[in-house]
Image: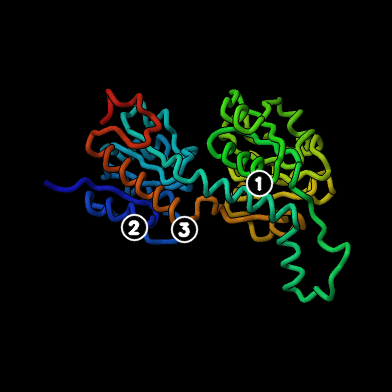
Amino acid sequence: MPKPKVFVTRIIPGAGLMKVRAGCDAEIWPEQLPPPREVLLKKVATCEGLLSLLTDRVDAELMDAAPKLKVVSNFAVGFNNIDVAAATVRGICVGNTPDVLTDATADMALTLMLAAARRLVDANRYALAAQWKTWEPLGHVGQDLVGKTLGIVGMGRIGFAVAKRCRGGWGMSVLYHDVRTSEIADRELGARRVDLDALLAQSDFISVHANLDDTTRGMFNAAAFRKMKPTCVFVNTARGPHVVQRDLIEAVRTGTIFAAGLDVTDPEPPNPADPLLSTPGIVVAPHIASATVTSRNGMAQIAADNLLAGLSGKPLRAWVNPEVGPRRR
């Protein structure tokens, strides 16, 4: 019996790729950059499965170009690149890779928080440019974390993990803004749920972990930054479009806020000439929050399991649209 044909849009860790190759007739895109749109449409035309990344737009046009498609397995927690409603109507299963990158992402948020608060990247550039001549009493002075107030926007798994680290490590008070109360955060961390304006005004550090939708897109704009303390450090490891980047650049440049650390941008990557990359006080990482051996291997295994389950008619390990079950292809 022939193996089901699938297309994998990038080389993923072997922990998952070996499973895909063993169970499927798999074509893997070998390039560093994602396949161009016209190539992707051609590749999926005869496929039953697609293993995609956030950089691949999986919309109604693509699904209609792939009449045999049974499953889209996204190598990511997010799935904003996939039109889930269109997939559900067409009987296509959609999977993602949650949970395994919670700790890695929380650690990255802390890394950016510390780097931005202590002006680490600016100081490193200073040293590498041979500007370091002596110990300077007023040089590269940053912000303390001990006893400060942390504001979490989106108290889900990752937001809670960041808050737990900050509460336990530096005795920080925790505020959070979310559509729901987090009983575990309230109970274990003494956290308080507040409205967004209160969080912006009272927090010394703000870390974003919200989902991206019409209510959160562009929520951190000039008006939001003006409500923050001038000593505030802003961190985003969630989604780039949460932030109006020109407003963030201006806020840091003018001292409206102290500093920012970003693992996500809009677009990704930024233009090399974008002032986001050269403004003192802004630390930018190339979307590497999940880039640990454990997390990436776990993501690859879940993505492979989702793909194989979708092809065989079984429940997906991490199923975005389980309601499609009774009418799946």
Q: Earlier in the sequence, mark 1 or mark 2?
A: 2
Whole-number angstrom distance, CA of label 1 to CA of label 3: 39 Å
Q: Residue at x 31, y 29 (%)?
A: 91
- Tell me the kind of residue under disc 1: Gly
Please name whichever residue, 20 or 111, is drawn nearer the observer in this view of the structure.
111
Q: In the rendered image of this protein, does residue 138 appear above or below residue 252? A: below
Please name whichever residue, 120 or 86, is drawn nearer the observer in this view of the structure.
120
Q: In the rendered image of this protein, does residue 31 appear above or below residue 117? A: below
Q: Earlier in the sequence, mark 1 or mark 3?
A: 3
Q: Which residue is mark 3?
A: 33
The local secondary structure at tag 1 comes to: helix
Residue 107 coordinates in the image, percent (x, y): 58, 50
- Left or right: residue 79 versus residue 252 is left
Please name whichever residue, 80 or 200, is drawn nearer the observer in this view of the structure.
200
Q: Residue at x 60, y 48 (%)?
A: 264
Whole-number angstrom distance, CA of label 1 to CA of label 2: 35 Å
- Tell me the kind of residue under disc 2: Gly
- Left or right: residue 216 versus residue 253 is left
Label ID, residue 169: 1
Residue 10 coordinates in the image, percent (x, y): 39, 55
Q: Residue at x 67, y 45 (%)?
A: 235
In the rendered image, which quarter is residue 199 located in?
top right
Residue 225 coordinates in the image, percent (x, y): 77, 39
In the rendered image, which quarter is residue 82 located in?
top left
Residue most extreme to the left: 1
Q: Residues within 10 Å of mark 1 (few under 14, many from 20)?
A: few
Q: Which residue is mark 2?
A: 14
